[in-house]
């Protein structure tokens, strides 16, 4: 189920479209960007959802994100704050 949600969100254009998604889906989309870039998750929730197979970066600051991915993560984080999502 999570994989389908992430794929559905990934096809959306940036902008107000994110406002229609609940916190869990925003969380999944943001973390899918990190997973694809090689982040090694620490929380049980993220490890359960994404696993750590093939991860390469223990520190989030070390994850090499493209400008597009950085912008996408920033937009998702703004929406998470606006919606009052818990970290």
Image (spheres, grey):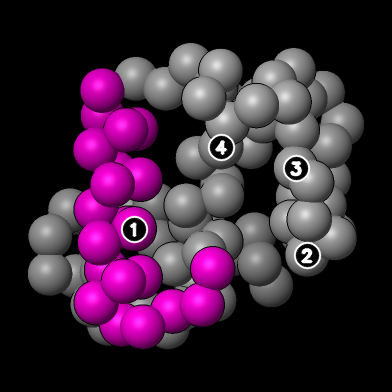
Label 3: few (<14), some (14–19) or many (≥20) C-alpha neighbours in 10 Å? many
Alpha-carbon distance for marks 3 and 4? 9 Å
- Give the mark count: 4
3 and 4 marks in contact (CB < 8 Å): yes
- Taking the spot 75% from the left edge, 33% from the top edge, the residue there is 40
Image side of residue 40 versus residue 14, left or right: right
For disc 1, the marked residue is 77
> Which of the marked residues, 2 or 1, is nearer the chain's N terminus?
2
- Taking the spot 50% from the left edge, 40% from the top edge, the residue there is 33
| Circle on res. 34 | 4
Residues drawn in magenta: 67-87
Residue 15 sits in quarter: bottom left
Residue 71, compared with residue 38, is above or below; it is below
| Circle on res. 45 | 2
Image side of residue 73 versus residue 20, left or right: right
Secondary structure at badge 2 equals helix
């Amino acid at each position: 189920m999570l994989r389908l949600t992430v794929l559905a969100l990934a096809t959306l254009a940036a902008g107000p479209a994110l406002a229609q998604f609940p916190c869990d889906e925003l969380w999944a989309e943001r973390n899918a960007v990190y997973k694809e870039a090689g982040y090694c998750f620490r929380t049980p929730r993220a490890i359960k959802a994404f696993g750590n197979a093939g991860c390469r970066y223990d520190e989030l600051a070390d994850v090499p994100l493209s400008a597009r991915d950085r912008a996408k993560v920033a937009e998702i984080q703004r929406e998470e704050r606006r919606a009052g999502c818990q970290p």
